[in-house]
Image (tube, coloured by chain):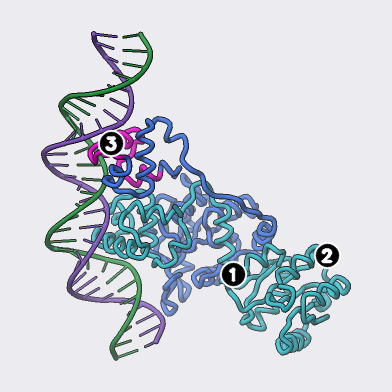
Chain colours: A cyan, B blue, C purple, D green
Amino acid sequence: MNKSKVNKAIQVALVEDDPNLRANLTTMLNGSSGFQCQAAYPDGLAALRGIPANRPDVVLMDINLPGMLGTDCVRELKELTPNLPVLMLTVYEDSEQIFKSLMSGATGYLLKRTSKEKLLEAIREVNAGGAPMSRQIARRVVQYFQKVNELPTDTRNASVVVNLTDREQEVLAALAKGYAYKEIADLLQISFETVRTHLRTIYEKLHVHSRTEAVLKYLGR
Amino acid sequence: MNKSKVNKAIQVALVEDDPNLRANLTTMLNGSSGFQCQAAYPDGLAALRGIPANRPDVVLMDINLPGMLGTDCVRELKELTPNLPVLMLTVYEDSEQIFKSLMSGATGYLLKRTSKEKLLEAIREVNAGGAPMSRQIARRVVQYFQKVNELPTDTRNASVVVNLTDREQEVLAALAKGYAYKEIADLLQISFETVRTHLRTIYEKLHVHSRTEAVLKYLGR
DNA sequence: CCGCGCCTAACCCGAATGTGGTATGGTTAA
DNA sequence: TTAACCATACCACATTCGGGTTAGGCGCGG
C-alpha cells in the first residue's frame, strides 16, 4: 500500500482555495512534529499538476474548490496516483457530497471544525492505511452501505421516516410487519392505547388514513 | 437520532452466550462511570423479546450466538428499533463476518480483544451517533464504496399470486394500493360484499389473517 | 346433464382500526 | 423557567375488517 517512512515526517499536500485557511493549515502542519506540508495548492488544476510530481504521502483536500470541484479533482488524482490517500475536508455534512467524494476515491472525510489534534491523528491514520471519518460521517457511510446492500427483504423508506420520532418509527416498523395493535403493544411493552396514540400521530405526519397506506409509504410504495 | 441523556449513564444491553464473558462485561460496564448494563441476554430470542421493550441506548452483541445468529438477530432488531445502535463483538476478523454484520444493520464492529478503554470509547461514540470500526474495516468499507454502482430496487409480486384467480389478483392489487373495501368495489364495479368474499378467499389461499399481511406477501415481503 | 370452480351477492357478529378529546410526567430548546 | 415536544395512557364513538354462512348464475369438461 503505502511505503511511507515511519521515521520521517509525513509529507502532506494541501488543496484549499481560502488563503487564510491554507496558510493556517500549512503553519499548523509544519509546526507539528512528524508532519510536513510539502505543498499547498489553491485549486484543483494546480493540484493535479503538482501532486503527481511531488508524491506526497497524504493529500488534504477541500471539497469546495473554485473551477474544479474537489470530488472531480479526487477522481482525476486517483487515476494518476491510485494509492495516494486523500482526505476530504468540508464544512458540509450533507450525504450527497460525502458519497460523491467517497465514490470518487477519497479515502477519508473530515469536517473542517475537526480539532487540530484529531486532524493530525486522521492524517497519521490514513497514512497507516486507515480510513478516518468523523463520527457523523462514519455513521452515514454505514447507513448507506446497509442501504445499497439491502436484501429483497427491503424495509423502510428513509425519506418518509425522517419526521417520525424513534418510538414512532418503531411502531411503524412493527405495523409494517403485520402486527396487530395489541401485538405491537405487547412487543414494545406499552399499552394498547399508547400504540393507538402513536399511530394517530404517524398517520398525521404521513398524511394517510389507514394502516395499509402507512405501510406502503413506509416501504416506499 | 438518539435523545440520550448525556449526563446519565449510557444504558447498555448485552447479548452474549458465554456466561463468563457475559458476567465479565456486565461487571466491567457497571463498574465504569457513565455506563450501566441494563440487561444481559444469553441468546437472540431473549434479546428480541427484551430489547424493544427496555429501550437501551446501545446494544453490544456477540456475533456467534446459539440458535439465532447474531447477524440475524441484528436484522430483526433493526426492523423493530431502527435507530437503536448495535455494536457487534467478535473474535473473527474475516471480512465475510464483517460485511454480513454491517449489511444486517450493525452500527459498528469491534474485535473481542479490544481493550476495555477502547470498548467504552466505542460505546460512547456509537451513542453519540458515530460508527466505530477498526481502521482495516473502515478502509474496506470505503473501498467497497468506490466500486459500487447501484441499479437495484423494485421486486414486484411473484409466485405468491399463482394460486389466485384473475379476479382475486385484481382485488389484491387494489388492496395493495391502499384502497378500502368500498373503494375496491367501486373500482371493479362489484358490490362491497363481493369484495369481501374475494378477500376471504385470498386470505385463505395466502394463509394470512389481515390486510397488511396480504399486502406484504403480495409485495414479496 | 351434472358437477365443479368461479364471480357474484347478502346477512350477521365480533374484533380491529380510525379519529376526536384529554391528561400526566419527563426532557429539551429557547 | 416557560414553552414545546415526546411517550405514556384512557375514554368514546364511528367505521372498517375478518370470518362464518348461504346462495343464484355461468361456463366448461366429463
The rendered magenta stretch, by its main secondary structure, is classed as helix
Q: CA distance from mark 1 to mark 3?
A: 49 Å
Q: CA distance from mark 2 to mark 1?
A: 27 Å
Please name which of the two marks, 2 or 1, marks the residue nearer to the observer.
Answer: 2
| Circles 2 and 1 on the same chain | yes
The answer to the question of whether label 1 and label 3 lie on touching residues, with beta carbons closer than 8 A, is no
Determine whether, in the image, residue D12 is placed left or right of residue B43: left
Please name which of the two marks, 3 or 2, marks the residue nearer to the observer.
Answer: 3
Residue A137, disc: 1
Q: CA distance from mark 3 to mark 2?
A: 65 Å
Circle 2 is placed at which residue position?
Answer: A80
Determine whether, in the image, residue A167 is placed left or right of residue B102: left
Magenta stretch, residue numbers: B189-216
Residue in the picture at 29% in, 35% down: B198
- Callout 2: helix, strand or loop? helix
Residue A122 magenta-highlighted: no
Residue B201 magenta-highlighted: yes
Neighbour class for label 3 at 10 Å: few (<14), some, many (≥20)? Answer: some
Query: Of B120 and B31, which appears nearest the observer?
Result: B120
Please name which of the two marks, 1 or 3, marks the residue nearer to the observer.
Answer: 3
Residue in the picture at 49% in, 68% down: B28
Circle 3 is placed at which residue position?
Answer: B200
